[in-house]
């Protein structure tokens, strides 16, 4: 059965959320990429937990994001640092936000998705993690700066 356009979009959104969670877990628990990838694909994608069914994620996007974030972490962190104020380098920010910036930076460097879509998607991810905070506005500003550096033509 073929997925509808909306179902594919939801799967990609879920993959982005899962990528942020996976990158956070890798850093917090010191676990390797392959181990965490396997855990997510086996126990999170579409899993039922306490009567709730988790979203099905777009497996290829998820794998691509975490692989690119790990392989290009230094470059992505430098890109993020340039978007942050000098008093708050990436090493000092919330680890969830750090994972979010790494996943979104990875997606930006792949240049397969329009920058504005990436910004909107990861602002939504920030809202999921910080529903009552100002973090989503902060994420929007930082990602806008990063996107303008990576893809200046998209904003011309």
Image (tube, helix red, strand yellow):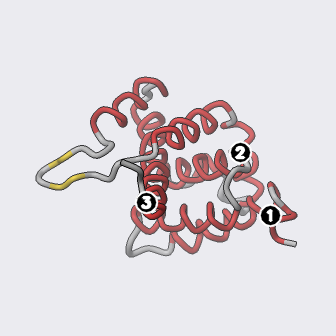
Q: Please tell me the numbered disc located at residue 12.
A: none
Residue linked to disc 3: 4
Determine the CA span between mark 2 and mark 3. 24 Å
Q: Residue 149 location in percent, x, y?
A: 82, 58
Q: Which residue is mark 2?
A: 110
Q: Is residue 106 above or below residue 70?
A: below
Horizontally, residue 80 falls left or right of residue 30, namely right
Measured Cα–Cα span from mark 3 to mark 1:
32 Å
Q: Which mark is residue 148?
A: 1
User: In this rendering, which labeled residue sits more in front, label 2 or label 3?
Assistant: 3
Residue positioned most to the left: 51
The answer to which of marks 2 and 1 sits earlier in the sequence is 2
Location of residue 52 by image quarter: bottom left
Q: Judge by depth and name the residue closer to the eye, 101 or 66.
A: 66
Disc 2 secondary structure class: helix
**Considering the numbered disc 3 on the image, is that residue within a helix, a strand or a loop?**
loop
Choose mark 2 or mark 1, whichever is in front: 2
């Amino acid at each position: 059965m073929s997925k509808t356009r909306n179902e594919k979009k939801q799967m990609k959104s879920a993959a982005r959320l899962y990528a942020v969670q996976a990158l956070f877990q890798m850093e917090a628990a010191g676990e390797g990429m392959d181990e965490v990838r396997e855990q997510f694909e086996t126990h999170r994608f579409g899993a039922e937990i306490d009567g709730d069914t988790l979203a099905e994620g777009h497996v290829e996007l998820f794998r691509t994001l975490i692989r690119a974030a790990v392989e290009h972490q230094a470059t992505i962190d430098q890109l993020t640092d340039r978007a942050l104020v000098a008093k708050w380098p990436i090493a000092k920010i919330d680890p969830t936000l750090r994972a979010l910036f790494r996943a979104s930076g990875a997606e930006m460097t792949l240049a397969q998705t329009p920058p504005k879509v990436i910004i909107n998607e990861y602002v939504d991810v920030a809202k999921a993690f910080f529903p009552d905070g100002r973090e989503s506005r902060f994420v929007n500003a930082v990602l806008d700066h990063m996107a303008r550096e990576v893809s200046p033509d998209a904003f011309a």
